[in-house]
Image (cartoon, rainbow, N blue to C red):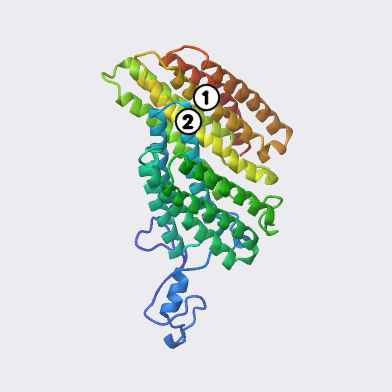
């Protein structure tokens, strides 16, 4: 008989085994008791037992692991949103107008709703079985179809986007309704929540039978139904004592990490906008390279602000819901900023249109103001005068930066000067973020 214990090394002695106890035996040894047990005493493996192990009910919220980490399945799920956000940003870059911005915000909210629901389900009720994979992959397929049509809304892509969004929303209805069936404690919230999303799915699916603008008003009504269902569910639900403190949904390291990962996804649009802008310029000389590099520096400055000031820091418990939804204007602004950077670089050899300049400065100003709002709900500000003082300085720097960024929209500066101003104005609060990071490092 050969027995390999937990953490033991097998084929390669230089790496510990990542798996739990492994038993390789030629004799019937019980893996837990270690005693010789007749093979006949092992429970029979039946098809029914196998199905139960592969297809489990949703995890109960009260059993949620407060220290869980993001799984590879969740990271894979996030990848499909890279595609749909890129398509939305491309559409905004093609139409940098008030109408284009309005459609961008509407469709981005639909994408956000799809992502945040998938994220919540994994964090609150996720299981490591076949069912979670099937539902996750089905959602990815629906979101992929949304991405195909996203940049053609309004227009030829409207019906395809509506049907794909309805399909994804129906999957969410099944997921959230299942939680109420298997977790009675969650039922007061799951019933109104899944009902609201069923109404939304119905409105999106039937909108293909109507002509614009009625069909688009049906979309708006469906998204409003989702928001209403969320707030009704939260008002009817009392979280278990083991999970919330005074928060309806307490944050976990995995939830904070998922928000940071989504910010990374949308920041990627700023980088992609810079690269694509340079790639579209011919011939590419030193002037265009400088302008493209300024676009990437804008992305670096935004990353610096969020990941020094916000990321890996818990919100005040009672403000968790506000913390979650303050990320929405942030990620919308970051994705729009990618479209703004792309358009600005493409106009490096000509006058910068006012619509492009306002898209750039407006999106970045909103992003900085969103980061400021997020700093105000962080728990770290309540942990002592030193932390509160550092964040007070950061608050002032963020506010001044946002105002000055917006003021650039009143100028007639060209592409290079506008982007250079964005970089300089992001450095001001970035210095405050550096102080926060340095202080945290010294305490650690």
At 35% from the left and 43% from the top, the residue drawn is 148
Furthest residue toward left: 283
The N terminus: image quadrant: bottom left
205 shown above or below 180: above
Residue 240, relative to residue 208: is it above or below? below
Viewer-proximal residue among 32 and 53 = 53
In the image: residue 207, left or right of residue 188? left
Residue in the foreground of this view, choosing between 323 and 146: 146
| Residue 180 percent coordinates (x, y) | 59, 64
Q: Is residue 279 above or below residue 404?
A: below
Circle 2 residue = 101
Which residue position holds label 1?
A: 362
Q: Residue at x 65, y 64 (%)?
A: 185
Residue 82, numbered label? none
Q: Quadrant of the C terminus?
A: top right
Residue 442 seen in the current view: yes
Circle 2 — which element?
helix
Quarter of the rendering containing residue 338: top left
Left or right, 414 with respect to 173, comes to left
10 Å crowding of disc 1: few (<14), some (14-19), many (20+): many
| Residue 261 at least partly seen | no
Residue 115 in picture, x, y percent from top left: 49, 47
Q: Quadrant of residue 190?
A: bottom right
């Amino acid at each position: 008989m050969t027995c390999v214990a937990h953490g033991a090394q097998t084929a390669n002695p230089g790496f510990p085994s990542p798996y739990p106890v492994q038993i390789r035996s030629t004799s019937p040894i019980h893996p837990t008791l270690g005693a010789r047990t007749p093979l006949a005493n092992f429970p029979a493996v039946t098809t029914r037992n196998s199905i139960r192990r592969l297809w489990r009910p949703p995890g109960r919220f009260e059993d949620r692991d407060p220290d869980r980490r993001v799984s590879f399945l969740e990271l894979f799920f996030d990848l499909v949103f890279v595609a749909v956000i890129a398509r939305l940003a491309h559409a905004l870059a093609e139409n940098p107008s008030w109408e284009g911005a309005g459609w961008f915000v509407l469709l981005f909210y639909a994408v956000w709703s799809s992502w945040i629901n998938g994220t919540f389900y994994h964090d609150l009720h996720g299981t490591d079985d076949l069912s979670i994979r099937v539902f996750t992959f089905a959602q990815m397929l629906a979101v992929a179809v949304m991405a195909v049509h996203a940049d053609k809304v309004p227009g030829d892509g409207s019906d395809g986007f509506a049907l794909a969004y309805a399909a994804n929303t129906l999957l969410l209805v099944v997921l959230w309704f299942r939680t109420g069936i298997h977790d009675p404690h969650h039922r007061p919230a799951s019933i109104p929540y899944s009902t609201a999303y069923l109404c939304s799915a119905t409105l999106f699916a039937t909108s293909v039978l109507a002509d614009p603008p009625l069909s688009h008003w049906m979309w708006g009504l469906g998204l409003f139904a989702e928001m209403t269902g969320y707030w009704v569910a939260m008002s009817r639900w009392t979280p278990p004592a083991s999970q919330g403190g005074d928060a309806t949904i307490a944050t976990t390291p995995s939830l904070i990490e998922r928000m940071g990962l989504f910010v990374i996804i949308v920041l990627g649009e700023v980088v992609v906008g810079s690269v694509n802008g340079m790639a579209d310029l011919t011939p590419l000389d030193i002037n265009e390279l400088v302008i493209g590099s300024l676009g990437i520096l804008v992305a670096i400055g935004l990353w610096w602000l969020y990941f020094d000031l916000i990321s890996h820091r818990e919100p005040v418990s009672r403000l968790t819901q506000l913390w979650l939804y303050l990320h929405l204007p942030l990620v919308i602004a970051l994705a729009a900023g990618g479209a703004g950077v792309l358009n600005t670089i493409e106009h490096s050899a000509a006058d910068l249109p006012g619509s492009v300049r306002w898209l750039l400065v407006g999106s970045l100003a909103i992003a900085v103001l969103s980061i400021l709002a997020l700093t105000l709900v962080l728990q770290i500000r309540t942990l002592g005068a030193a932390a509160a003082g550092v964040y007070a300085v950061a608050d002032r720097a963020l506010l001044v930066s946002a105002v000055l960024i917006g003021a650039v929209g009143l100028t007639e500066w060209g592409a290079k000067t506008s982007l250079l101003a964005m970089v300089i104005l992001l450095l001001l609060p970035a210095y405050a973020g550096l102080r926060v990071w340095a202080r945290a490092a010294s305490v650690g």
